[in-house]
Image (tube, coloured by chain):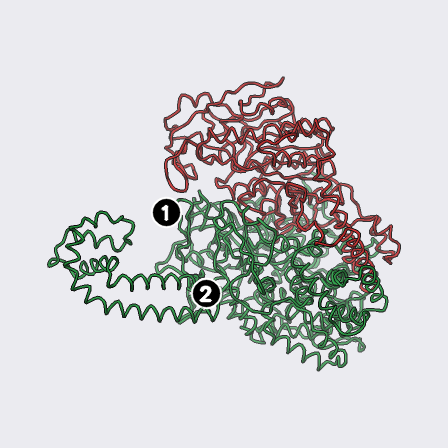
Chain colours: A red, B green
C-alpha cells in the first residue's frame, strides 16, 4: 500500500448535505458523498490497537530513580564511572568524569508479574500487570528540542511528520466530527508545534491542540452578542449561497466548505461538551483525583479528556506533561513530578480497562531521553553550585506501554550496572516506532509518502519490530 | 480533495489516454525511466553502497555488459526474465507489487526497439521549441502559451472553456498580481470595456502597483524560511525584516531573477557591494538555529549548512539533496562527494554562532550583521542624535583642559579619601578599571600616553567638569541603540575553510577532503569564476544551467494556476512528476531568460494568455475528467493562502492598512501563546495598536515557537524549513477562525458599518457589498437570500459575516 496514491481520507460529512435537499448538489457530488468512507483505512496486517494515547514526560525522567533499579550504583556513589564507558560520550552539561550518584528510592516487585518499580509510583504499581516495561530505549539526541523531534518524528531536526501525523495518514479517522490527532498539554514542548506537525504530509494530519478547560479550541465562541440561533442563520445563509456557487463552478471544494461550516457550528457545542466532565460519575473523577483540588490536575484532566477522545474515535491523543528535566535538586523535584502523574496514569489504565477500551488502545509513557547516572551539581545557566541533579542521557531510558497487542507484565531489555548503556535487547526509537505502527496494523516499511523525490517513512531507513514484547 | 471525485468510468477514460500513447511508440523518459527509477534504482542505481549484485541499471553500458539488457533482444535480456518470472524468489522488484503487464510490455517493446537511453530531460538544456499550430480556429489564443496548452487539449480530446466573466477575471488578475480584490469602480469600468487592450492596460497598472511586491514576496518568504525568531528552545527574537523588505522591493523594481539570485546567495561577495546587496544575503541567515542548553557549536553549524545546501538545491535547482548528506543519491546522479562540494561553498562562512557567554543559556549570534533603522523618521532621529553626540563630544573636549588642570589634585584626593576602594568595582566600565590601577601603581611622570588617557577616562567618569557631558553622551548613545537594530547577513572567512565529506552524514567523522564544486551531472562551472558563493551563484544563473529557469517559471506558474507544470516543484529529478506540458515549460524557461530574467514580464506573459483568462465555471463532468485541472481546459480556481484571506477580508471591510515595509507588527492573537514557548526570554506578545493591527499578513511577526494559530489553520508554515508548496486544506477550524477570530469579527463590524452608509436601498447595498468581495454582480436570488437574513435580525453584521465567509470570497475563481 503506497498511501499517497490512494488518498482516501476525506473530511466530508455526508448527512447534513443529504438532509438538506435544497442545496442543489449535483448527482455526481451525491454519489461521491455516499461513497466517502469514514471507516478505518485498510491496514497491512491485523491491527492489535486502533488508538494511541502517548503520555510524553517533557524533560526526560530518570530511569535509575523510576523503573530501572541500579543497586550497584550505590557502591560507585561519589566516584567517576569507568572511563571506557564514558569516553567520547556526548553530554549536555556535565563532563565524562562527573561522579556517579545513587538513587535514594526503594524498589520492589509489583503485582503478580513482579514488575519492579520505585516507590515513587504507588498508584501505578496497582496496574503493574497491565504494563509492558522497556528499559532499553535509546535515542540519538541529547537536547530537548531535537530529542522530542526524534521521539516523535524519528529525526532530530525540524520538518518531518510526527508519529501522530503518520498514524492519521495511515489509518484515517473514525470520527468525522473530531480531528484524528489531538494534542493536550500542560507544557509546550521545547520543539513547539513541530512536536505535533504533519511535516511534509498533507497539513490535515497535523495535531489539533485542545486546551485544558471549558474552551479546548481557539475561536469556539461566537462574537459578543451573537446567539447560537443567529449563528445558525448565518451558517444556513452561507450554505445556501455556497450551494449556488457550487451550481456555478461545480468545484467539490465548495461542498466540502459547506460541510466544514456545518461541522464548525456543531463543534461549538460538541467540543465544550467533550471537555465538560459533568457527565462523569463521581467514582471516575475520584479515580483520576479530580474530585478535589490537587497539584497536577491539568495532567489528570488531560488523561480523562484523552479517554473521552479515544472513546469518541479520535485516533491519536498526544499528552505532554511538564517538569521532568531534573538537572538540579532532583530529589526534591522528581517525587513531585511523579506524584503529579502517578494517580492519573493508573486511573487512565483502569478506566480504559473497565470500558473495554484498553485492548484497542496503545498507551505509551516516557520522555524524550533518560538521565545520566552521574551527578550534575551546577546550574546549567549560571554555573552556580546547586543541589544534585542528573544530566540528559541518550544511551538508555525506560518507558512503559500498555494495551492492545502487548505482553502485559513483561519487563524487556536491560542496562548495565550503572544504567548508562543497554546490554540486552536494545530498542532504538526507530524500533519503538516500528513496533507501535505494527501494533496499529501498519508495516513501517510500507507506510510511505513521496516527498522530494523519495518515499519517506517514520522510521527513515531503520527500525525493526520488537516481536518479543508482542502478545 | 479533488482527486477522489474521479468516477471510476472517468478514471478509466483518463488512463486510456496514456495507454494508447504508450502502445504506439515507447518513449524512454515517459514510459521506461519512471519505472526504472521507481522500482530498480534503489538497489541498482547510482548509490554504490546499496547496490545489489553489482548491477547498475542507470547506465546503459553497465546494464548491457551485465546482460541485463540486450538491445533488440528481449528474450536474452535477463531484466525481462526477472520481471516476468513467476518464481517469487527471483522476481524483481523483490518488494512491492510486480510490474503490470502493461509495464512489462513497455519494457519488451523498448528493448526490441534498441533500448535507447536518454538523459533525464531536466538535465538537458530547455529545447528551442516553436509553438505548435492549432487547427481549431475558433479557440481563442493570445500568445504561444495557448498553442502549447491547446495542442495538448486537442490530443486528450478536450477543449478550452469560454473566457471568464470580466468581473471575475479582473478579480482573479488583481488577486494574482497584488493579492487584493479590485475596487468596485475598477470592476465596473472593466465591465464597460473588457477589451484586450483594456485588459493589458490593467495588467500593466497592477504590475506597477507597490502591492505587487507584497503579493509575490510572500511566496518567496516561504522558500527563504523567513521568520522573526530562531526556533527551537528559547526561540529568541531576531531582526530580519530588512531582508523581507528587500524582497518586496526587489519584486517591485523587477530585479532580474539572475541578479535577485546572486544578491541573495552572494551579495556580500560582489565587489563594492551595496548595502541592499548585503541585506539580501539574509536569505541564508534565515535558517532556524538551535541555541538550547546542550547544543554543540559544530553540530549546529553543520545543521545550518546542511539547510543552506538543501534549500539552495530545492529553490534553484529543483534538486533534493538531503539524502546525500549520508550517501550517494539513490535515484538522481548526485554523489555524496557532489553534495559536500556544494557544502564547501557554504562552509566558508565565518563562525556565526557562539555557545559561549555569561551563562550557558546565553547563546548568541556572532556572525556579520548590519545596523538598520525602522523608518525614515527613526533614521532622521538617529541622525539628530548622532549630531548631538558630536556636539557633546566637542563640549567634552573643551572641558578636558580644565579637567587636566585638576587632575593632580583629583588623583590625590581620590587616593587619600580611600574613595577609590570604596567605589564598587562594577561601577567602572571595563576599560576604566585600568585607570584606577594606574593611579595607584604608576606615578604621573612615568605614565605612557596610553596610561595617561586611561586615567583621564577614569577621571572623567567621576568628574564634575566632564561627567555631565559623558553622561549625556551615554544617554544619547543608549537612545541611538534603541533605534538601531542589527540584521544578520552573510560573510566569509578570509582564510579558506577545509571541507570534508561527513561519513554517514556525521560531522564528528570527517572523511575525504573535498574542494568547492558543482554536481558532475550539470554544466561545468566556469574556471574564471571565484570558488566561493559568488561563483556558485553565477553558475546557478548561467544560461547553460538546465534547471534554474525551468524551476523558477514552474513556481511562478504554480502561484497562478495552483500547480506547476511539474507538480513536484522542489524536485525535478528522476522521481519527479513528468511535466504535463514539457514543451511549454521549455518555452517559458527560454522566454524567461530571453526577457532578461524579468519576473514581471514572464508573469505578464502568463496572465495575458487566453488559457489564463478562461472561466473556472464548468460542469461536474468536466471537473471529473480532469479534477486537478492539469490539462488547463478551464481557468484556475483554488483557496487563497491564510495571509491573502486575511488581507482580502481587511480590504473588503475597509480596515486594511496600506503601509509598506518596516518592522514586523503584532496583530491580535489568542493570549498566552508566547508564554508557552519553552525557555523563552520574551514571553509577552506586544499586541499592536491602531493601524498596525490591520497590516498585510506578511508583516505579522512570525515566532517559530508558537505562530499565530490562524496562520497554521490555513496551512501557513512556521517557516522552520524551506516550503516550496503549501497545502490547501479545507477544515472546520478554518470556519471557526473566520467566523469568530477577533480580527475577522472586527472586519465584519467595519464592513457592516460600511454597508449601513452605502448608497441606495437595501438591495443596492447588498449588491455593492457583494461586489466588493467577489467583484461579480450577485444574482437576484443571491440578493434575496441575503436580504432575508438582514430582515430577520435587522443587523448588517450578519450579512457582512456571510459575505466575508463566502467560498468565493476566500477562493480565487
Residue annotated with mark 2: B266
Quadrant of res B757: bottom right
CA–CA distance in space, label 2 to label 1: 33 Å
- CB under 8 Å between discs 2 and 1: no
Give the residue drawn at x 57%, y 69%: B659
Q: Residue A70 at x, y = what percent?
A: 47, 23
Q: Residue B267 at x, y = what percent?
A: 45, 67
Q: Residue B177 at x, y = what percent?
A: 64, 71
Which badge, 2 or 1, comes first in the chain's sequence? 2
**In screen coordinates, is A224 left or right of B433?**
right
Subunit ID for the residue under disc 1? B
Outermost residue toward the left in this view: B445
Tag shown at residue A88: none
Dot 1 alpha-carbon crowd within 10 angstroms: few under 14, some 14 to 19, many 20 or more: few
Outermost residue toward the top in this view: A112
Tag shown at residue B358: 1
In the depicted view, which residue is nearer to us: B318 or B104?
A: B318
In the depicted view, which residue is nearer to us: B80 or B553?
A: B553
The number of callouts visible is 2
Res B69 visible: no
Kind of element beneath mark 2: helix
Dot 2 alpha-carbon crowd within 10 angstroms: few under 14, some 14 to 19, many 20 or more: many
Q: Nearer the observer, disc 2 or disc 1?
A: 1
Q: Residue B345 at x, y = what percent?
A: 44, 59
Assign the N terminus of chain B to one quadrant of the image.
bottom right
In the depicted view, which residue is nearer to us: A443 or B607?
A: B607
Give the residue drawn at x 46%, y 60%: B517
In the depicted view, which residue is nearer to us: B338 or A416?
A: A416
Assign the C terminus of chain B to one quadrant of the image.
bottom right
**In screen coordinates, is B578 left or right of A265?**
left
**In screen coordinates, is B717 left or right of B637?**
left
Give the residue drawn at x 62%, y 73%: B602
Amino acid at each position: 500500500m503506497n498511501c499517497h496514491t490512494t488518498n482516501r481520507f476525506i473530511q466530508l460529512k455526508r448527512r447534513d448535505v443529504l438532509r438538506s435537499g435544497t442545496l442543489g448538489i449535483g448527482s455526481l457530488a451525491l454519489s461521491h458523498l455516499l461513497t466517502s468512507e469514514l471507516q478505518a483505512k485498510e491496514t497491512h496486517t491485523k491491527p492489535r490497537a486502533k488508538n494511541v494515547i502517548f503520555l510524553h514526560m517533557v524533560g526526560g525522567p530518570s530511569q535509575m530513580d523510576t523503573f530501572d533499579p541500579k543497586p550497584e550504583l550505590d557502591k560507585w556513589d561519589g566516584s567517576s564511572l569507568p572511563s571506557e564507558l564514558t569516553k567520547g560520550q556526548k553530554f549536555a552539561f556535565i563532563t565524562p568524569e562527573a561522579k556517579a550518584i545513587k538513587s535514594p528510592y526503594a524498589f520492589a516487585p509489583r503485582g503478580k508479574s513482579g514488575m519492579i518499580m520505585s516507590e515513587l509510583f504507588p498508584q501505578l504499581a496497582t496496574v503493574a500487570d497491565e504494563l509492558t516495561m522497556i528499559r532499553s530505549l535509546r535515542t540519538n539526541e541529547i537536547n530537548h528540542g531535537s530529542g522530542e523531534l526524534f521521539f516523535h518524528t524519528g529525526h532530530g531536526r525540524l520538518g518531518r511528520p510526527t508519529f501522530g501525523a503518520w498514524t492519521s495518514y495511515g489509518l484515517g479517522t473514525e470520527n468525522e466530527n473530531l480531528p484524528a490527532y489531538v494534542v493536550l498539554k500542560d507544557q509546550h514542548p521545547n520543539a513547539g508545534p513541530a512536536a505535533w506537525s504533519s511535516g511534509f504530509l498533507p497539513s490535515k494530519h497535523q495535531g489539533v491542540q485542545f486546551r485544558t478547560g471549558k474552551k479546548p479550541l481557539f475561536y469556539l465562541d461566537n462574537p459578543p452578542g451573537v446567539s447560537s440561533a443567529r449563528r445558525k442563520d448565518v451558517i444556513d445563509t452561507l450554505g445556501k449561497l455556497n450551494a449556488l456557487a457550487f451550481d456555478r463552478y461545480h468545484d467539490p471544494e465548495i461542498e466540502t466548505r459547506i460541510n466544514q461550516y456545518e461541522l464548525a457550528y456543531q463543534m461549538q457545542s460538541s467540543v465544550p461538551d467533550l471537555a465538560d466532565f459533568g457527565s462523569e460519575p463521581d467514582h471516575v473523577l475520584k479515580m483520576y483525583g479530580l474530585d478535589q483540588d490537587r497539584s497536577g490536575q491539568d495532567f489528570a484532566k488531560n488523561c480523562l479528556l484523552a479517554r473521552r477522545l479515544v472513546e469518541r474515535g479520535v485516533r491519536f491523543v498526544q499528552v505532554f506533561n511538564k517538569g521532568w528535566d531534573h538537572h538540579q535538586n532532583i530529589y526534591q523535584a522528581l517525587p513531585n513530578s511523579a506524584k503529579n502523574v502517578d494517580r492519573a496514569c493508573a486511573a487512565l489504565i483502569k478506566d480504559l480497562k473497565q470500558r473495554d477500551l484498553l485492548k484497542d488502545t496503545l498507551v505509551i509513557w516516557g520522555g524524550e531521553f533518560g538521565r545520566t547516572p552521574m551527578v550534575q551539581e551546577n546550574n546549567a545557566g549560571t554555573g552556580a553550585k546547586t543541589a544534585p541533579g542528573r544530566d540528559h542521557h541518550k544511551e538508555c531510558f525506560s518507558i512503559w506501554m500498555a494495551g492492545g497487542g502487548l505482553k502485559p507484565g513483561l519487563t524487556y531489555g536491560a542496562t548495565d550496572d550503572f544504567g548508562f548503556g543497554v546490554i540486552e535487547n536494545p530498542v532504538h526509537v526507530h524500533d519503538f516506532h516500528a513496533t507501535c505502527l505494527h501494533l496499529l496494523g501498519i508495516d513501517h516499511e510500507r507506510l510511505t509518502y513521496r516527498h522530494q523525490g523519495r518515499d519517506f517513512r517514520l522510521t527513515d531507513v531503520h527500525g525493526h519490530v520488537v516481536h518479543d514484547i508482542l502478545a | 480533495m479533488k482527486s477522489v471525485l474521479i468516477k471510476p468510468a472517468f478514471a478509466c477514460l483518463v488512463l486510456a489516454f496514456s495507454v494508447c500513447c504508450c502502445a504506439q511508440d515507447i518513449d524512454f523518459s515517459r514510459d521506461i525511466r519512471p519505472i526504472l527509477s521507481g522500482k530498480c534504482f534503489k538497489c541498482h542505481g547510482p548509490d554504490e553502497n546499496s547496490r545489489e549484485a553489482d548491477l547498475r541499471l542507470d547506465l546503459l553500458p553497465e546494464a548491457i555488459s551485465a546482460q541485463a539488457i540486450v538491445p533488440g533482444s528481449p528474450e536474452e535480456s535477463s531484466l525481462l526474465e526477472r520481471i516476468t518470472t513467476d518464481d517469487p524468489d527471483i522476481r524483481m522488484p523483490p518488494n512491492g507489487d510486480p510490474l503490470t503487464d502493461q509495464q512489462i510490455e513497455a519494457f519488451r517493446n523498448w528493448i526490441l526497439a534498441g533500448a535507447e537511453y536518454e538523459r533525464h530531460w531536466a538535465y538537458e538544456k530547455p529545447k528551442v521549441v516553436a509553438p505548435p499550430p492549432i487547427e481549431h480556429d475558433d479557440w481563442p489564443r493570445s500568445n504561444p502559451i495557448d498553442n502549447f496548452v491547446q495542442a495538448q487539449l486537442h490530443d486528450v480530446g478536450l477543449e478550452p472553456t469560454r473566457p471568464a466573466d470580466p468581473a471575475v477575471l479582473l478579480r482573479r488578475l488583481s488577486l494574482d498580481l497584488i493579492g487584493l480584490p479590485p475596487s468596485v469602480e475598477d470592476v465596473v469600468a472593466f465591465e464597460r470595456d473588457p477589451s484586450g487592450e483594456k485588459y493589458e492596460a490593467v495588467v500593466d497598472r497592477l504590475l506597477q502597483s507597490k502591492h505587487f511586491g507584497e503579493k509575490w514576496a510572500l511566496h518567496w518568504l516561504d522558500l527563504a524560511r523567513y521568520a522573526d525568531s530562531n526556533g527551537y528552545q528559547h526561540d529568541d527574537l531576531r531582526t530580519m525584516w530588512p531582508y523581507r523588505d528587500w524582497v518586496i522591493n526587489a519584486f517591485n523594481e523587477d530585479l532580474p531573477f539572475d541578479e535577485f539570485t546572486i544578491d541573495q546567495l552572494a551579495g556580500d561577495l560582489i565587489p563594492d557591494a551595496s548595502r541592499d546587496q548585503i541585506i539580501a544575503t539574509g536569505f541564508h541567515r534565515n535558517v532556524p538555529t538551535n541555541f538550547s542548553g546542550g547544543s554543540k557549536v559544530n553540530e549546529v553549524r553543520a545543521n545550518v549548512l546542511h539547510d543552506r545546501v538543501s534549500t539552495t538545491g530545492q529553490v534553484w535547482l529543483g534538486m533534493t539533496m538531503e539524502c546525500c548528506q549520508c550517501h550517494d543519491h539513490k535515484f538522481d546522479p548526485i554523489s555524496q562527494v557532489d553534495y559536500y562540494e556544494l557544502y564547501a561553498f557554504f562552509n566558508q562562512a565565518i563562525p556565526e554562532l557562539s555557545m559561549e557567554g555569561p551563562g550557558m543559556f546565553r547563546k548568541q549570534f556572532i556572525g556579520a550583521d548590519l545596523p538598520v533603522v525602522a523608518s525614515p523618521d527613526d533614521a532622521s532621529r538617529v541622525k539628530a542624535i548622532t549630531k548631538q553626540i558630536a556636539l557633546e563630544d566637542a563640549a567634552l573636549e573643551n572641558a578636558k583642559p580644565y579637567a587636566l588642570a585638576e587632575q593632580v589634585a583629583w588623583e590625590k584626593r581620590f587616593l587619600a579619601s580611600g574613595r577609590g576602594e570604596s567605589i564598587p568595582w562594577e561601577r567602572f566600565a571595563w576599560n576604566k578599571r585600568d585607570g584606577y590601577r594606574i593611579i595607584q601603581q604608576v606615578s604621573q611622570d612615568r605614565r605612557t600616553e596610553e596610561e595617561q588617557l586611561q586615567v583621564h577616562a577614569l577621571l572623567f567618569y567621576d568628574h564634575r567638569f566632564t561627567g555631565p557631558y559623558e553622561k549625556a553622551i551615554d544617554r544619547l548613545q543608549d537612545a541611538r541603540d534603541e533605534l538601531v537594530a542589527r540584521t544578520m547577513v552573510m560573510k566569509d572567512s578570509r582564510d579558506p575553510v577545509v571541507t570534508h565529506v561527513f561519513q554517514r552524514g556525521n560531522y564528528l567523522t570527517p572523511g575525504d577532503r573535498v574542494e568547492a564544486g558543482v554536481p558532475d551531472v550539470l554544466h561545468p562551472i566556469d574556471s574564471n569564476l571565484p570558488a566561493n558563493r559568488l561563483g556558485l551563484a553565477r553558475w546557478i544563473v548561467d544560461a547553460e544551467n538546465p534547471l534554474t529557469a525551468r524551476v523558477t517559471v514552474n513556481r511562478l506558474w504554480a502561484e497562478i494556476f495552483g500547480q506547476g507544470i511539474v507538480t513536484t516543484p522542489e524536485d525535478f529529478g528522476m522521481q519527479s512528476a513528468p511535466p504535463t506540458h514539457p514543451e511549454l515549460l521549455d518555452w517559458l524557461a527560454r522566454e524567461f531568460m530571453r526577457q532578461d530574467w524579468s519576473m514581471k514580464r514572464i508573469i505578464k506573459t502568463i496572465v495575458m494568455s487566453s488559457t489564463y483568462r478562461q472561466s473556472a465555471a464548468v460542469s461536474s463532468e468536466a471537473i471529473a475528467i480532469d479534477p486537478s485541472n492539469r490539462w488547463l481546459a478551464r481557468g484556475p480556481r483554488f483557496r487563497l493562502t491564510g495571509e491573502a484571506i486575511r488581507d482580502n477580508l481587511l480590504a473588503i471591510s475597509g480596515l486594511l492598512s496600506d503601509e509598506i515595509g518596516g518592522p514586523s507588527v503584532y496583530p491580535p492573537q489568542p493570549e498566552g501563546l508566547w508564554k508557552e514557548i519553552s525557555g523563552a526570554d520574551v514571553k509577552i506578545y506586544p499586541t499592536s495598536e491602531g493601524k498596525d493591527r490591520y497590516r498585510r499578513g506578511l508583516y505579522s511577526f512570525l515566532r517559530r515557537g508558537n505562530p499565530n494559530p490562524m496562520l497554521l489553520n490555513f496551512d501557513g508554515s512556521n517557516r522552520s524549513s524551506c516550503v516550496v508548496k503549501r497545502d490547501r486544506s479545507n477544515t472546520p477550524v478554518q470556519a471557526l477562525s473566520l467566523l469568530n477570530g477577533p480580527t475577522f469579527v472586527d472586519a465584519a463590524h467595519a464592513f457592516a458599518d460600511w454597508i449601513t452608509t452605502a448608497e441606495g436601498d437595501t438591495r443596492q447595498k447588498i449588491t455593492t457589498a457583494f461586489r466588493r468581495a467577489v467583484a461579480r454582480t450577485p444574482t437576484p436570488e443571491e440578493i434575496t437570500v441575503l436580504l432575508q437574513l438582514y430582515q430577520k435580525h435587522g443587523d448588517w453584521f450578519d450579512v457582512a459575516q456571510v459575505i466575508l465567509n463566502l467560498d468565493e470570497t476566500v477562493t480565487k475563481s
